[in-house]
Image: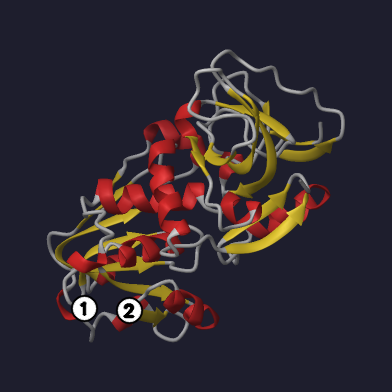
């Protein structure tokens, strides 16, 4: 099979046209990958000793070729997943996956759009509804009037995770304010943002000297300025790593509050990591099929264009997810 190979010790990527097919462990599924998403920074994630060579792209959409006779899914099912890292990802034509990370993918989207969803959507779901304890109530009939909706703030709303924070919070009945650059304002508004702050026109530190602050802030790009959006005793949740991955074991996930003028008293912040969860991904499928949310694809690249794809994903300018087309079928 064709596969993108990542060697961590040398931080090199290459394309193999003659990679051995994976063996299928008992109780797992053989998946033919159609498309795979690139998560910025994934090439730097720590791995167990001895796992130097692996396959990137930790989320993928594909078709089940074979699985356990008593499994939840059957051959021919179109599925997607976020791999249970550090297992090899979807940057290859075939991979094996466990049942607990799989979900039927939305029937109303392409494989490329489906591949853009798992990591970002699961990150936002867990940040909103687990870390912050908000209610995942998507019944619009029970939502309060717009003027009475609880408010949240999303820093970096056009990023792959940021757009899902906006969409899920909006679908759950929250008032969403968000930051992005000028050119991405129409996109962020279309995803459900009630207020949009153009950070290229007004830095957050200046903006929040004259505008109301928020009890909850979700940061997707680095919390340095997002602290200024917090109301007194507010909480900030970030997915920006608190240090280099080489120091992962010593990370402090509770963030120190910067000593900067304009930051309110009693605020605190926390870094969190998402986890793979097929059942949760199934709930996201329902929202996409119901037209409540959608994947945002920055661009689609062929397997032979892997260098450009990873360069785009790591360049800090992608709007949504960079996706690799693995198979034409």
Q: Nearer the viewer, mark 1 or mark 2?
A: 1
SS class, disc 2: loop
Where is residue 128? Give x, y as percent. 29, 54
Which circle's residue, 1 or 2, is located before the other in the chain?
Answer: 1
Residue named by callout 1: 146
State whether residue 239 appears in this view.
no
308 vs 118, nearest the viewer: 118
Where is residue 61? Give x, y as percent. 61, 44
Where is residue 261? Give x, y as percent. 23, 73
State whether residue 305 appears in this view.
yes
Question: Left or right: where does residue 133 sit relative to residue 46?
Answer: left
**Rendered image quadrant of residue 90:** top right
Residue at left offset 53%, top offset 32%: 46
| Quadrant that contains the N terminus | top right
Residue at left offset 49%, top offset 81%: 186
Label pair 1/2, CB-CB below 8 angstroms? yes
Q: CA distance from mark 1 to mark 2?
A: 10 Å
162 vs 208, nearest the viewer: 162
Where is residue 117? Give x, y as percent. 52, 52
- Res 194 label: 2
Question: Left or right: where does residue 202 sit relative to residue 16?
Answer: left
Question: Left or right: where does residue 149 sit relative to residue 80?
Answer: left
């Amino acid at each position: 099979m064709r596969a993108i190979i990542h060697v961590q010790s040398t931080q090199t990527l290459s394309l193999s046209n003659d990679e051995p097919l994976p063996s299928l462990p008992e109780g797992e599924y053989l998946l033919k990958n159609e498309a795979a998403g690139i998560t910025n920074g994934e090439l730097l994630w720590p791995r167990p000793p001895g796992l130097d060579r692996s396959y990137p792209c930790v989320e993928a959409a594909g078709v089940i070729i074979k699985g356990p006779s008593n499994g939840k899914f059957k051959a021919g099912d179109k599925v997607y997943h976020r791999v249970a890292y550090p297992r090899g990802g979807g940057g290859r034509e075939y991979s094996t996956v466990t049942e607990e990370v799989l979900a039927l993918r939305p029937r109303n989207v392409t494989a490329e759009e489906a591949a853009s969803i798992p990591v970002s959507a699961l990150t936002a779901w867990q940040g909103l509804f687990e870390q912050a304890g908000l209610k995942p109530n998507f019944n619009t009939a029970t939502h309060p009037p717009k003027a009475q909706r609880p408010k949240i703030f999303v820093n970096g709303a056009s990023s792959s995770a940021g757009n899902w924070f906006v969409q899920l919070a909006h679908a759950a009945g929250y008032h969403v304010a968000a930051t992005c650059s000028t050119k991405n304002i129409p996109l962020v508004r279309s995803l459900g943002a009630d207020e949009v702050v153009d950070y290229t026109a007004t830095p957050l530190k200046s903006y929040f000297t004259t505008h109301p602050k928020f009890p909850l802030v979700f940061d997707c790009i680095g919390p340095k300025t997002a602290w200024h959006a917090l109301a007194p005793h507010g909480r900030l949740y970030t997915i920006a790593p608190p240090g280099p991955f080489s120091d992962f074991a010593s990370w402090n996930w509770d963030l120190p509050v910067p000593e900067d003028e304009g930051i309110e008293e009693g605020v605190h912040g926390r870094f969190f990591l998402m986890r793979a969860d097929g059942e949760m991904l199934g709930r996201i499928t329902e929202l996409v099929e119901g037209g409540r949310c959608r994947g945002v694809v920055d661009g689609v690249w062929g397997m032979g264009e892997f260098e450009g794809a990873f360069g785009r994903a790591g360049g800090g300018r992608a709007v949504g997810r960079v996706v690799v087309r693995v198979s034409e079928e």
